[in-house]
Image (tube, helix red, strand yellow):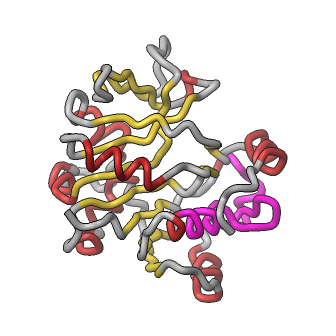
Amino acid sequence: MRPVRKAFLLAAGLGTRLRPLTDTTPKCLVPVRGRPLCDYWFALCAAHGIEEILMNTHHLADQVRDYVDGVRRDVRIRLAHEQTLQGSAGTIRENADFVADEDAFLVIYADNLSNADLSALIAFHRAHPGPFTMGLFHTKHPTQCGIATLAPDGRITAFTEKPERPTSDLANAGIYVADRATIADIPRDKPVTDYGHDVLPGYVGRMYGFPLECYHLDVGTPESYAEAEATCPDDIPA
């Protein structure tokens, strides 16, 4: 099989929980210790062999384009503007040509700060028969996340968005490895299509989960943004 060379970086959200900061700054450009959040992902992807990233835009898209045009990284960056938001899975469906020649690809939610070992996640995916692998992290707030239950072999036997009674603390990290064939499973009859609600439940029993055992933080609220500033690890590639 070919190496995993491409990643979708989902960055088009409005960042409403971070307002008023995101009223004038797109969430992917919110600085953590002076460095835009998306830049951490550019560097981490490059460090793990990703050659090209497709990043979607919507809110304050001109700022994102200006930044990407001026940044120099060891990874190619392609922008896909969404006049109307497509949803996390809808973006992959509408840009399927980006991975037309690939066996598998990464999907990353850009609003997280992470030093995840993407190479280990990809290797795990290659070693298991499922078409889809979900990166997982241990959360302190399981009722606020998508929570997975794992079988001993790593298969995800249950997945519930924001459960009232969580069965574990293993949360969806917003980092996936997916075989190209999974794009056909994304519904086409919904203009806005979300992985968590519309796609992942159909993979329960067939997809695998990989606990990342890393620093991983959703930079989605003023409180978590302050936490990111205080705790951002030094080992994320620059």
The spot of residue 188 in percent (x, y) is 19, 55
- In the rendered image, the vertical position of residue 84 relative to residue 145, given as above or below: below
The spot of residue 195 in percent (x, y) is 35, 45
Residue 81 sits in quarter? bottom left
* Number of dots carrying numbers: 0
Left or right of 190: which side holds 78?
Answer: right
| Magenta residue span | 17-44
| Quarter of the C terminus within the rendering | bottom right
- In the rendered image, the vertical position of residue 139 relative to residue 80, given as above or below: above
The spot of residue 120 in percent (x, y) is 43, 49
Q: Nearer the viewer, residue 132 or 10?
A: 132
The spot of residue 27 in percent (x, y) is 64, 60
Residue 29 magenta-highlighted: yes
Q: Residue at x 30, y 46 (%)?
A: 125
| Quarter of the N terminus within the rendering | bottom left
Q: Residue furthest top?
A: 165
Q: Residue furthest bottom?
A: 70
Residue 70 sits in quarter? bottom right
Q: Residue at x 28, y 52 (%)?
A: 178
Left or right of 38: which side holds 126?
Answer: left
Q: Residue at x 46, y 20 (%)?
A: 163
Magenta highlight: main SS? helix
- In the rendered image, the vertical position of residue 221 relative to residue 143, given as above or below: below
Q: Residue at x 64, y 83 (%)?
A: 71
Left or right of 174: which side holds 226?
Answer: right
